[in-house]
Image (tube, rainbow, N blue to C red):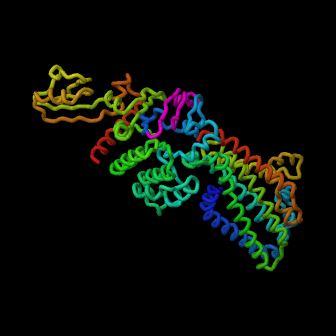
Amino acid sequence: MVEITRYEARRRVRGTVALSLGVGLFGLLMIALYPSIATSGVDFAAYAESLPPAVQAGFGIDAIATVEGFLAVELYQFLWLLLLGLYVAYTAGGTIAGDIESGRAELLLAAPISRARFLVEKFLSLLVPVAVLNLVVPLFVYGGVIAVGESLSATDLLAVHVLSVPYLLACAGFGLFLSTLVSRANVAQRVAIATVFALFLVDSVTADTDFEWLGVLSPTRYYNPTEILVESTYDVTGAVVLLVAGAVLVLASVASFRRTDL
Amino acid sequence: MSVLSVRGLTKRYGDTLAAEDLSFDVERGEVFGFLGPNGAGKTTTIRTMLGFHAPTAGTAELFGHDVREEGELLRAKPELGYLPGSPAFDGDVTGRGYLDFHARLKGDERREELLDLFSPPLDRRIREYSTGNKQMLGLVQAFMHDPTLVVMDEPTSGLDPLKQERFNQFVREERDRGTTVFLSSHVLGEVRRICDRVGIIRDGRLVALEDVDSLLDRGGKRVRVHADPPLVAAELDVPGVVDFERLGPEARFTFTGDYDDLLAALSTHSVVDLEIEEPPLEDVFMHYYGAAPDDDAGDAGAPRDANREALEGAGGG
């Protein structure tokens, strides 16, 4: 029943493995730098206080002196939240529009497959990078933290990855929806990353300001790695909001794709 | 019941009318040629009648199932094979991997038999394929689940003459075992070799629907005669000579009459050289449907040249 997902997933494996190793090694590099930064006598508190309150809150910089805070700021808040969000939105943006543009879609849809199934299976294949990254990278991070003689709550680390799945799926859902609306793949991809980036910025710079409500549409509002790692606070409601948003976007994509001329 | 029934099918993109009020039926076991110059609306018609594009008006039925309803369309698809024009594949997959994938979606009971006829390099990645190899891979996937109806858009484009001949032979055998074939082409010679019946489309409208034989009778042949002394029109009083013209020592005309009469008339002359060939599709339009197709100037030369080339290629092979 999931032949398309299997086929697409297999095609994504190689790139996913490379990306996971890359992110994992980058994590190790950052962690390797931590002991020398921590013992350098830099006054992180003063550094944090010198930044505007919105930035302090947005990037969780006030906790940067601890290993949890350091990981949150250097790895999760930026690389995971922003870059991987952009990556899945971009990848999803290329799926449907790319298949239609190239003519691959009509060749596949000549087989007895409904458009809904085609689209959902394509979406499910995006679980490959989402799942593999979340399985591989925490091993690098945890191993790295132990190796430099620090400690980290394994539960919090697990939570930061588990709760990132709804976030990444919501980003993927958004890219997928654009992919059914726009007929050119590269336009869908560019709009997807531009939108996710803009929402990230809006949410970041309005945090703790009178304009905080502006970030309510941003998926980054519902997943906060700093809170999880530094305060062990898990925003389960936020995760549910993201899952619902992802599901709504997939349903909207199905409705849109069913009316599309291939 | 017709295998394919097109009813008033119309497709409009904005201001462009790509297909207008097309109606025709394709019966079980026939090879139907959908003939028209490039840009006439063949591909749009095919995509719309298979449900890939939503019709602006009218509809098509595959095995009695309305293609506008996805549920109905899905019931027809197991019996459908489809080869798009210039089929697109995933370049990072091998030919075998791609066929395996399609096999899981629709079956492949005839795969091996087809690969004996059409032999793309299965273990190479598709991005390394030539146009001809992609076309062969497309043909194998179109027929491998043994469908009742196969729809092909310009199936021989990119095939070398030898493979084209193999394809023609294959299509005739398929018809004999009961498969219905719908294929589009802009090459009259190709259609006359393998099709039983032809629909001709021009500017999105169906201008003719007839048996291949009667089409050819109406289309006639291009004849060039180099006689010494040169032939003049008055000397060639044979029924079926149309558009006689002289170019230097050579006389050219379209001939729709009886060859015996023509040869008898020529036998009284000293013939240095004689050529009888298929007319380009444009000439068929010109002489028998009133006017040349309204291609823009840049496009008009291409199909004609391609046509000649294909005819010569097929004649040689």
Left or right of B305 on screen, residue B255: left
On the image, the x and y values in percent for residue B313 come to: 31, 45
- Could you tell me residue A125's position as x and y percent? 66, 57
- Give the quarter of the image for residue A252: top right
Vertical arrangement, residue A12 with respect to residue A37, above or below? above
Q: Viewed as shown, does residue A121 lie left or right of B108?
A: right
Q: Which residue appears farthest toward the top when viewing the image?
A: B234
| Residue A184 vertical placement versus B298 (above, below) | below
* Quadrant in the rendering for residue B238: top left
Q: Magenta segment range?
A: B1-29
Q: Residue at x 26, y 35 (%)?
A: B277
B248 or B162, which lies in front?
Answer: B162
**B19 in magenta:** yes
Please name whichever residue, A144 or A112, is drawn nearer the observer in this view of the structure: A112
Q: Where is residue A148 in the image (x, y as percent from the top left)?
A: 78, 78
Query: Is residue A197 located in the magenta-colored stretch of the structure?
Result: no
What residue do we see at 60% from left, 39% from top? Answer: A261
